[in-house]
Amino acid sequence: METVVLKVDPLNPDPDVIGRAAEVLRAGRLVAFPTETVYGLGANALDAEAVARIFDAKGRPATNPLIVHVSDVSEVLNVASVWPECAEKLSARFWPGPLTLVVPKRAELPEVVTAGGATVAVRCPAHAVARALIRASGIPLAAPSANRSSELSPTRAEHVLSGLNGRIDMILSGGPCSGGIESTVVDVTGKVPRVLRFGLITVPMLEEVCGKVEVGATAGVARSPGQLTKHYSPRTRIVLADSVVQVYIELLRLKREGKTSGVMVFSPLLGVDTPNWFRLMPTDAEAFAACLYQTLHECDCAGLDAVIVQLPPDTPEWSAIRDRLVRAAA
Ligand code: TXA
Ligand code: MG
């Protein structure tokens, strides 16, 4: 199929463009669109055949459930059967925004969306294009990140096109995503909320609203299946370094092996031969997140054997970035 790319103003989306994309979605077809985290690949969440097309286009395992996007909290009961008190509090504080809440699923929601599970992940995105699109189509949108399964998430329309050209119907091209990494996923079906995926909404931010939260999947409770596999990976091999000294050591080791290498570090390297590729990364976690995937996409284009990445500190505001880097290096 031909993938149609339509330009759209990220702040003031043209209703005609949004209308065309909404029509495609209502016809059971796929549209990639920008959100404040990464680009999503949307389909009508209430149409099992349309949702199956997402799994096909991405090569996504059927065991990995999707996030359903709504334009307002008043729409959650179209896909969820219960809206727990904790979901109410968290959505009141962080929606629209980069927070996904896992709640009991409504029976009418097709099983393909939730990979046969009894819960559904719901998010209300903040991006004007995403919101306008959900409203105009009048349906909840199932949307994973718009990349081939296990590859890097797209933060620009070009990334979507390079991964999914010819496999999806339309891309709304609305510029770079400001957040840069995927939403925080929190399971609120139990007594204590459980963070299943780190994101820009940090653990301290959640705890300020709903008290103590637990972190990570444990046996017997809901998990994020997507978190169990190799994920968020660029093609270039990633080598993690805990310190600048470690960066130097890895750089020399790769050179001795005759490998080309890049580095992503927090301060300029002094007194060594320049690496083949170099990026100075922001020391602010939000700014780092905003450019992380774009930088890794650029790194892939450079065709290096490996890239050495200096790890940020092990503090709550960096958890999501450390998580993505560790997975990318796995
Ligand atoms: O920021 C985001 O969340 C982006 C944008 C497009 O909204 N979406 C995104 O979707 O990252 P995806 O499919 O790439 O990641 C969804 C994650 C996966 O790890 C999946 O396993 C988990 O959410 N998930 C979905 N439904 C779940 C459920 N019912 N229970 C537990 N985890 C779930
Ligand atoms: Mg993804």
Image: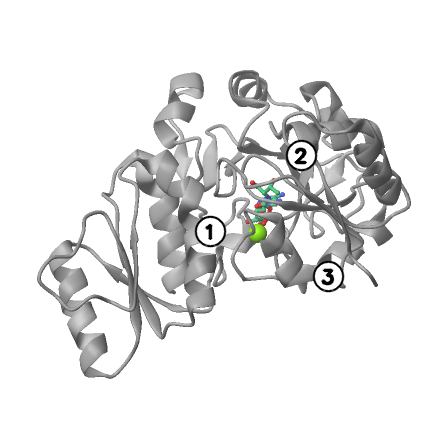
**How far apart are the alpha carbons under marks 1 and 3?**
22 Å
Reading the image, the residue beneath label 3 is 57
- Is disc 1 in contact with disc 3, using a CB cutoff of under 8 Å? no
Ligand 1 resides in the quarter of the picture at top right
The N terminus, quarter of image: bottom right
Reading the image, the residue beneath label 2 is 104
- Disc 3 is placed on an element classified as helix
Name the N-terminal-most of marks 1 and 3: 3
Q: Position of residue 47 (x, y in %)?
A: 85, 45
Q: Does residue 231 lie above or below 293 as drawn?
A: below
**How far apart are the alpha carbons under marks 2 and 1?**
35 Å
Q: Amino acid at mark 1?
A: Gln
Is the residue marked 3 within 8 Å of ligand 1, measured from its CB?
A: no
Q: Residue at x 41, y 51 (%)?
A: 324
Reading the image, the residue beneath label 1 is 294
In this rendered view, identify the residue nearer to me: 193 or 65.
65
Q: Which quadrant of the figure has residue 100?
A: top right
Q: How many marks?
A: 3
Q: Nearer the viewer, mark 3 or mark 2?
A: 3
Q: Does residue 139 lie above or below 264 as drawn?
A: above
Left or right position of 142 against 259: right
Label 3, residues with CA under 10 Å away: few <14, some 14-19, many ≥20: many
Q: Amino acid at mark 3?
A: Ala
Left or right position of 285 against 250: right
Q: Position of residue 21 (x, y in %)?
A: 82, 40
Name the N-terminal-most of marks 2 and 1: 2
Q: Is residue 61 visible?
A: no
Q: Is residue 231 visible?
A: yes
- Disc 1 is placed on an element classified as helix
Which residue ends up furthest to the right in the rendered image? 27
